[in-house]
Amino acid sequence: MSPSQLAIEATGLRKAYGEKVVLDGIDLAVPAGTVFSLLGPNGAGKTTAVQILSTLISADGGSARILGHDLTGEADAVRAGIGVTGQFSAVDNLLTAEENLLLMADLYHLPRAEGRRRAATLLEQFDLADVAKKTAATFSGGMRRRLDLAMTLVGQPKVIFLDEPTTGLDPRSRRAMWEIIRGLVAGGVTLFLTTQYLEEADQLADRIAVLDHGRLVAEGTPEELKRLVPGGHLVLHFPDAQALDDAARLLPAGPRDDNALTLQTPSDGSARAVRAVLDRLDAAGIPVERLTVHTPDLDDVFFAFTGRPTRSTVPNQTGQTSQSTSSDETPKAAAR
C-alpha cells in the first residue's frame, strides 16, 4: 500500500520514562477510511501510543506521519486534521448541547454563521436536536457520549482517536454509537480505536493490533487473528451410535458424547476445512445430521498473545457479561 493511502504511518516508535520502556519500536500502518483498534493489557503502552500520535507527547525515537504530515516537523498540520475523543468526557455540564458545540466552533475560529450551521448539523446527526437547549448536566451517559463525539467533529477531522467510546453505556446506547462510528467511516473518516470491549473491536475494526510490554505481538483482521489461535473445532451430530463409532475411527481424535451422539474434531472453522471433513465422512458413507462450528474469539486471541488473565467482567451489547482485561494507564477493567 502506498503512503498516500495511509492515514496513519509509524515506524519504530519508542518511548521510555526513566528506565521503564513503554513503547519499544512499534510500526503501524492504518489505511484511510478504516477502523484500526489497538488492544493490550494494563501497562502495554496503548495510551502512550495514542498520546504520541495525537501530538500530546513526543516520542523518544522513530517517526510517524498522520495524513501525510510528519508528526514532529508538521505538528500543527497534524492537529488540524485530527480529533481526539478521550475516555473522560470533555463536555461542559454547565452549558447546553448547542453551547458546547458553539464553544468548539469558536476554538476552531469558525465564522459565527458557519459555526451555528455546523452545530445545527451535528445536533441533528447525533439525535440531539430536541435537547439542544438543555444543559449537559441533565443528559444520560449515552447522550453525553454522543455530544462528546459531536464536539470532536466540529473541526471535521479526517482522523479521530477514540478512547473507549462506549464505556459505561447501556446496550442500546452502545449500538447507537457503533452505528455512528460506522457512518463516520463510510464517509471516509479514519478511526483509531481503543476499547475495553473485545467484542466491540470485533464488530468495528477492520484491523486489530495487540500490544504487550510495548511491542506489537499480533496484527491482522479479526478473522486472521482468530485463525492464529488453536482451539477451533467442529461438533458433529450423528444419527446413531454406529455412525459415531465410525467417525471416531476416521477423524482426528477429539471428545465424544455417546449420549448426545456427538464428536468433536479440530478445525479452523474455514469453509475449506469444514468441506474437507464432510467430504471425508461422505466418502466413507458415514451420515451426519448436523454440525456446529466453534472458533476462537478475540478473548482467546488476547490471552494467547498476552498471557494475561481477566480481572473483571463487563457487559457486552446483549446485556450479558463477558471477560475483560485491565487498561494500560488506568485501573479500570479494559482491553484497550
Image (cartoon, grey):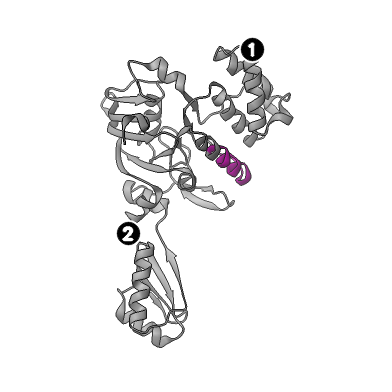
Identify the magenta region.
Answer: 168-181
Give the percent coordinates (x, y) of residue 209. Answer: 36, 41
User: Where is residue 170 shown, x and y percent of the image?
Assistant: 61, 43
Question: Which image quadrant for residue 285?
Answer: bottom left
Which quadrant holds the N terminus?
top left
Q: Is residue 40 magenta?
A: no
Query: 146 and 212: which one is in front?
Result: 146
Q: Is residue 296 left or right of residue 25?
A: right
Pointer 1 or 2: first along the chain: 1
Could you tell me the amino acid type at mark 1? Arg
Residue 95 in view here: no
Whether residue 171 appears in magenta in the rendering, the answer is: yes
As displayed, is residue 228 above or below residue 191? below
Q: CA distance from mark 1 to mark 2?
A: 58 Å
Q: Which of the labelled discs sits on residue 230, or is there none?
A: 2
Image vertical order of residue 34 relative to residue 243, above or below = above
Against 126, residue 266 (above or below) is below
